Image (tube, helix red, strand yellow):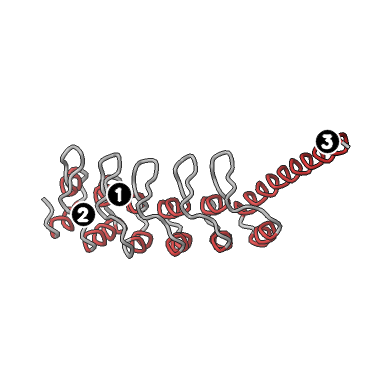
Amino acid sequence: MHRLATLVEALAISCAAHAQTALREIDRTLLAAAERGDAAAVRRLLADGASVRSQDAQGRTALLTATYANKPDVARILIAAGADVNTQDQMLNSAYLLAGARGHLEILRMTLAAGANLKSTNRFGGTALIPACHYGHVETVRELLKTSIDVDHYNRLGWTALLETVILGDGGPAHLEIARLLLARGAGVNLADHQGVTPLQHARQRGQREMATVLESAGGR
């Protein structure tokens, strides 16, 4: 009787281990399907028990993998299945933060609707707004400014969104429009970096004449 109980217990452990291995495999398959944008496969795998919470060695969920690859159809399915838009990988990217930084507007809108944490920050200590300004993603910036995001948040480099627009932007049409959007939202035109240099001073140093005019018109010093 004791031997039978032992055998049953061993069989149960073996079955559990096999199920765990199969689950890991199905989760890996889900991550791969999300990356290549295979919506049909993602639906099937979720129906078969794949987990939207599983993460690869870099800490990426299927949703984050889909965001890196800019696959909005897959992102939509995963979010509807309960994927967390705020889960961060080892690089401190979340689907929300990455969509903002890369200008993946459709996915960004989904993450905002799904409860994106507007106070979350990337590896530089910046909100989604700051890199969106840096890279000149005008429509992404416009979308983020519809929210209650802190327009004057400082990252670890000592830059606000407006400062980053000037310092890392090229002073061209996209960055000029972003500066106007930030100022219209109430961004501090004279908030200086950690060295005490204001946006206007940075613009002048970089020869960004049109940017300097925009900042001067808003009271920049």
* Badge 3 density bin: few <14, some 14–19, many ≥20, Cα 10 Å: few
The location of residue 17, given as percent across then percent down, is: 74, 40
CB under 8 Å between discs 3 and 2: no
The location of residue 50, given as percent across then percent down, is: 66, 53
The location of residue 109, given as percent across then percent down, is: 44, 63
Looking at the rendered image, the disc whose residue lies closer to the viewer, 1 or 3, is 3
Q: Residue at x 17, y 48 (%)?
A: 191
Give the residue type that dot 1 points to: Gly
Q: Quick check: 55 left or right of 196?
A: right
Q: Earlier in the sequence, mark 3 or mark 2?
A: 3
Residue of label 1: 169
Looking at the rendered image, the disc whose residue lies closer to the viewer, 3 or 2, is 3
Instruction: Give SS at disc 3.
Output: helix
Give the residue type that dot 2 points to: Met
Q: Dividing the picture into quarters, in which one does residue 117 lie?
A: bottom left
Residue of label 3: 6
Instruction: Give SS at disc 2.
Output: helix
* Badge 2 density bin: few <14, some 14–19, many ≥20, Cα 10 Å: many
Q: Residue furthest front?
A: 1
Residue of label 2: 211
* Badge 1 density bin: few <14, some 14–19, many ≥20, Cα 10 Å: many
The location of residue 143, given as percent across then percent down, is: 36, 63
